Amino acid sequence: MMGISKTEINLRRLLSAAPNQQNQSKLMHYVATLREQLEQLSEEKTPEGLPRVTKAKVNEYYEKIEAVASKIASQEPETEVSDEPFAKDSTSGSSPKIEDEPRSPTSPQLRRRIVPASSKEQSFDAADADSSKPIKLDTAAQAHIDKHRKLQEDLTDEMVVLARQLKERSQAISQSVQNTEKILDSTEEAIEQSLASTGHATTRATKIYSQSSKTSCFQWLLIFAMICVFIMVVLSASTLASVCGRVARAQAVSAIVNRSSLVPKPSLLRPFVSRGFPYSTATEPLKSDQTLIQVIDSEIKDSFEADDHDADEETIDSSDFPFKIEDNPGHRTVTLTREYNGEQIKVEVSMPGLAMDENEDDVDDDEDGDGRHEKSNESSIPLVVTVTKKSGLSLEFSCTAFPDEIVIDGLSVNRPDDSSEEQLTYDGPDFQELDENMRKSFHKFLETRGIKASATDFLYEYMMKKDSREYLLWLKKLKTFVQE
């Protein structure tokens, strides 16, 4: 919103000065000036086209002006005038004065109150009509009139400046609108050009794709032909190999026959020779079984010597390993159990993963050179740790035990009444995606319940010996089967 206009400021100043004015001529001039300024104020508009002053404010100013005018009408004349000149002047000059008096245009919202002319006003009009008796104003009134004239001139100049600024701004806005239209036109042309170039590129890509598809079909046909040729070569090679084998066997049989013909054949050997062929065919499978049994016995002996089963098993401090070991022969896992503060803790230990050879480590180091596989080259033991509360709710950890640390691969929460299908719905996020503080807290959780890296070496040795025992048991079962 804009501030108060100069017209309204002048109007307020005259309204505040009018009650203190005692000179009737000046007061009448104030009233006329106030009415003119009120008309101007009611016609003023804001840049948005709205009235600068509301109707209520205009009516308020109007009532104040009429109050000042009524004050003029109610006052008694200060000077005595004879009746005859007054009547003559009033009858002769009042009507022309009224007709010739310029009336300021009233606002359509205002209704001017008709105030009866007092004797003082009539004498004033008569004095104006009589040119031989002009009204002489004092210095203060003339200065006041000059001041108001100067204010009106300043207001006019300011309105001219505002009109000029408004014109310049409208021209600038029109220029910016024209520039915007030019930019939009250029943008539209650029879009049309880009669409046209995109269409050409699409057409060219379609042609290239059709040509490449034809080429790929030809390549597939060529590959199919090469595969057919390769299969024929393999089949011919296998046929040739079988023929060569038959020829070699025939040559070997002929050589054996020729050598046997060179051996002297006494008559005493004929009965044994005649019974030798059926006996050799019957004992041939028995010899193969005996050979297999001998190999199995040798493997069993080597296993005994390598494992040294008579040696005492390695022991570990009960404070570091508070679990009870449940080892079932014939199974690949060992179960560790314990109770901790009302919780049932069960650990399933699987067969360890063997470390890679040193030569392979050197090759990997030479190839990679960044040590990314150092952890994978260490001996590790898969563990499944289950911590069960009294309510039946359990927390299951999938871990890998290394000599220097326990790595948690994942975890899940299980309920005793959950079915297998419900348990497979969501096992939680990847453990490595959890917050670092949470991961450390879970490691501390397992360490408090006895899952420590200090027991990894013991478990590794134990599981290696179990693997040897299971292998020896398997050999004995195999030997029993062959012997039956």
Image (cartoon, helix red, strand yellow):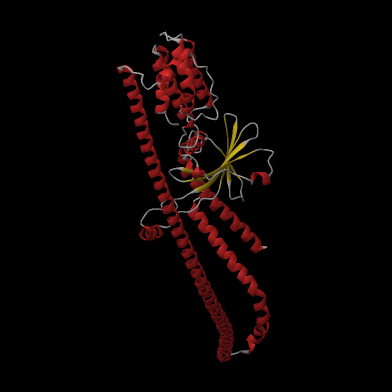
- The quadrant in which the N terminus is found is top left
| Residue 37 x/y as whole percent | 44, 26
| Residue 302 x/y as whole percent | 51, 58
Q: Residue at x 61, y 71 (%)?
A: 287
Quadrant for residue 258, please give it: bottom right
Q: Who is closer to the viewer here, 436 or 377?
A: 436
| Residue 448 x/y as whole percent | 50, 33
In this rendering, is residue 476 above or below 168?
Answer: below
In this rendering, is residue 73 above or below 320?
Answer: above
Q: Residue at x 65, y 61 (%)?
A: 481
- Indicate left or right for 190 with 276 as reference: left
Q: Who is closer to the viewer here, 478 or 454?
A: 454
Q: Who is closer to the viewer here, 10 or 144?
A: 144
- The quadrant in which the C terminus is found is bottom right
| Residue 186 x/y as whole percent | 44, 59
Q: Who is closer to the viewer here, 431 or 340?
A: 431
Quadrant for residue 255, please give it: bottom right
